Image (spheres, rainbow, N blue to C red):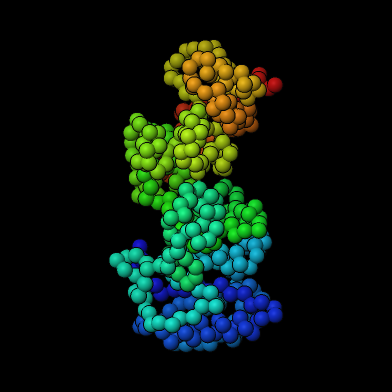
Amino acid sequence: MFSEIRQAILPLALRKLKRRGDLERAGLLIESLAKHWRDSEPLQVLIVSPERDASLLRESLPRFRNIEVSVRAEGDFFPSFSRFYMMTGWYRQQMVKLHVPAKLGFGGYLTLDSDVCCVGDFDSTTFIENGRALSRWEPKRHHTWWESAADIVGVPYDARTHGLSVTPNILHGDLARQALEHFNSGPVDAMTSLGFWVVRRIGSIAWTEYSLYTSVGELKGKKIGVRALGSSPHGLLSAMLAHVGLDPVKDVEWVADPLFVKMFADGKVDAIEIVPPASQELRARKIGHVIVNNAVDRPWSDYFCCMLAGQRDFIRKNPVASKRVLRAMLKANDLCSNQPEQSAKYLVDKGFTPRYDLALEALHDNIFAKWRDYDAEDTVRFYALRLHDVGFIKSNPQKLIADGTDWRFFNELRRELKA
């Protein structure tokens, strides 16, 4: 992925009382880069600053033939209504190091702060070896933000492992984009999502640019267990991976085995898709943790998770029986929602699950009553688009809806079962 490093990113905001000092430090950094850059082509240094500082920086920073400095305002990359501007300056600088290179399509790039200085000669290939960047790493146990970032991203935290250390360091634009896309969720963009976590973890450091970059990168290359390739869980997980910028074909390894749950418990696969009450049973055994819960995590929680299907000929010839089956299913949904204790006891008495407490927890975790609020056709459209994008289906949503759905009974029962 890495072939050369010819670009650098420097977020720079001049403080009101220390503007001259900030300028001098930035000038010393550029001077040190010019002294030690040993490549035939200039090093491109992009400085991103608040609008109020951009003109002064353009006028005041030193110029060197082998360092191509450009200054651009934050507003060139972040719209005026972005939650980016609600972050403190420290978090804004971290966002600049990820968002701007991703937006501009950088390859490998060097991250800089104005308080660093170059002390050794380097060129475009100094920090590349066999296509990999020679980045700086640190033990995760040294900083609490690693555990926080792992929780935010949804990956296990292991204090024995290492992550990318502080600035200066080497990143890649594609991976920076992938890190930010992980936090996009429908209308909620990465800036809003990450800003929320800053507020939620006030008093501590919720994340850094390197902890996000590393933690999202740790999702790649994992083994995912499914019962069978081409199954519904395989399709759903592929759509979820694509939603956060991962390639479900290239970035993970699929392991098909009927005993995929046991493989996960034994540590032979890294992730699985599982439904209640089996998910509660694993949780009770303290095995794994939840990365995505489609009952509460958007956009998945905005749509039906399951669907009732029948043979076309049977439904056409037996409309009364078909409607009775659907009515029974919907009334069962309401029963589970309104009388979870009775429903959990029924599941145990009939041998569906051995533990009442886990059955009750599963019923509380699932939002059965929301079937009246969801849009069935919109659900088909939503999943058809995503399954088409990852190659699971060939038909477009319009064709699937026209040829494969019939909402007459469902709409009639929605009106009938209003209470």
Q: Position of residue 151 (x, y in %)?
A: 53, 50
The residue at 39%/72% (across/down) is: 5
Can the viewer see residue 66 in this picture? no
348 left or right of 331? left
Q: For residue 227, which quarter of the picture?
A: top left
Q: Position of residue 161 (x, y in %)?
A: 42, 56
Can the viewer see residue 201 in this picture? yes
The residue at 44%/46% (across/down) is: 241
Q: Position of residue 154 (x, y in %)?
A: 50, 48
Number of numbered labels in the structure image: 0
The residue at 47%/54% (across/down) is: 159
Quarter that holds the C terminus: top right
349 left or right of 122? right
In the image, 358 versus 30, the foreground residue is: 358
211 left or right of 200? left
In the image, 262 versus 47, the foreground residue is: 262
In the image, 381 versus 92, the foreground residue is: 92
Q: For residue 118, which quarter of the picture?
A: bottom left
The residue at 33%/33% (across/down) is: 257
